[in-house]
Image (cartoon, rainbow, N blue to C red):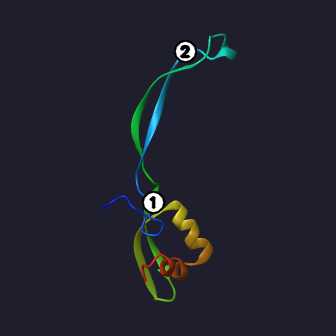
Amino acid sequence: MSRICLIRGSQPRAGRRIHRSGLAKKKGGIGRHVTKTVNRIVYPNLQEKRIWVPELGGFVKMKLSCKALRTISKNGAYNTLKAAGLL
């Protein structure tokens, strides 16, 4: 399965990790210097959950990000799924 949230559409995005060398000034060094950056992929925090939808009278199994779970808690399962175009 793809790594995409069904409600928010969150998906992996490109990022960088910064490599630094040297000792910090407050520890007695001459400061930290960036030596290179390395490409990496930042993945959304996806969870596979069964969401109870009282209006449908059953569970719906979905792959969601944690932020989408908070949206469901706030607005309710049926309204959130309807707004996302899944119902």
**Left/right of residue 79 with respect to residue 46 in the rendered view:** right
21 over 51 or under it: above or below: above
Residue at (59% x, 14% y) in the render:
23
User: Residue 62 location, x and y as percent?
Assistant: 40, 70
Outermost residue on the left side: it is 1
Quarter of the figure with the N terminus: bottom left
Amino acid residing under circle 1: Ser
81 over 8 or under it: above or below: below
- Graded by Cα atoms within 10 Å as few (under 14), some (14 to 19) or many (20 or more), the crowding at tag 2 reads few
- Label 2 to label 1: alpha-carbon separation: 37 Å
SS category of the residue bearing label 2: loop
Label annotation for residue 10:
1
SS category of the residue bearing label 1: loop
> Disc 2 marks which residue?
22
Amino acid residing under circle 2: Gly
Figure label count: 2
